[in-house]
Amino acid sequence: MTTLNITINGRGYSPTEVRDDLTMNDFLREYLGMTGTKFGCGAAQCLSCAVIVDNSDGTSYTSPTCVVSAASFNGKTIRTVEGHAKDGELSVLQKAFIEHFAFQCGYCTAGFLNEGQVLLERLAKNPVVRADLEKTIADALDSHLCRCTGYIKYHEAVRDVILADPTRYLG
Ligand code: FES
Ligand code: FES
């Protein structure tokens, strides 16, 4: 057993005793009822289960949760799809996903949303030139699988958010 101390969407969840073989996906969905994080392939291939991990230096990355133990997240600060809207207001990226009708079944959406958000935050710190934008977005979203093949819509939604605020995201 591991005594888990973790911060999720700005709220501390601790201490919680978890089995060492409990996956982070099961911890979120079954222990905390955060079912926005999905379980797809279960093999670290589709990233529908991805959450954002925030480092203490202000950088962030996404991590699968399906094959990763909850215990390995001990001491970490993470964000899930439930944390994007603030005071009932969807984030800019969530609104863009809706405007572009980016998702169909929605199974992959939380993963794409988290990845897109990490990209936006990275570009706000390290902007790219316009000429590199398409490749930058494609590279960021490349590891996520969408069985409904909404790739272009997701790409366009992220691009629109960036182009709507070029002084923030483009160098
Ligand atoms: S469910 Fe985790 S990568 Fe597919
Ligand atoms: S919207 Fe169905 S898997 Fe992507």
Image (tube, rainbow, N blue to C red):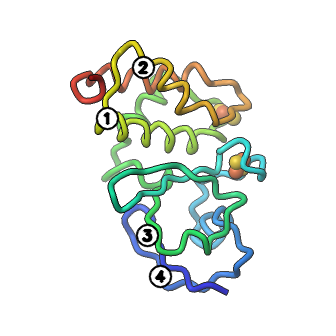
Label pair 4/3, CB-CB below 8 angstroms: no
At label 1, the amino acid type is Asn
Label pair 2/1, CB-CB below 8 angstroms: no
Q: Is residue 57 above or below residue 47?
A: below
Question: In the drawing, does residue 129 fall left or right of residue 77?
Answer: left
Quickly name the residue at label 3: 7
SS type, badge 2: helix
Quickly name the residue at label 4: 14
At label 3, the amino acid type is Thr
| Label 2 crowd bin: few (<14), some (14–19), many (20+), radius 10 Å | some
Instruction: Give the image quarter of residue 111.
Output: top right
Distance from the alpha carbon under mark 2 to that under mark 3: 32 Å
Q: Nearer the viewer, mark 2 or mark 1?
A: 1
Distance from the alpha carbon under mark 2 to that under mark 1: 12 Å
At label 4, the amino acid type is Ser
Quickly name the residue at label 1: 126
Q: Nearest the camera: 91 or 171? A: 171
Q: Earlier in the sequence, mark 3 or mark 1?
A: 3
Distance from the alpha carbon under mark 4 to that under mark 3: 8 Å
Q: Residue at horizontal 69%, vertical 67%?
A: 23
Q: Residue at horizontal 43%, vertical 40%?
A: 117
Q: Quadrant of the C terminus?
A: top left
Residue lying furthest left: 167
Q: Residue at horizontal 71%, vertical 73%?
A: 22
Q: Nearest the camera: 78 or 103? A: 78
Distance from the alpha carbon under mark 4 to that under mark 2: 40 Å
Figure quarter occupied by ligand 2: top right
| Label 4 crowd bin: few (<14), some (14–19), many (20+), radius 10 Å | few
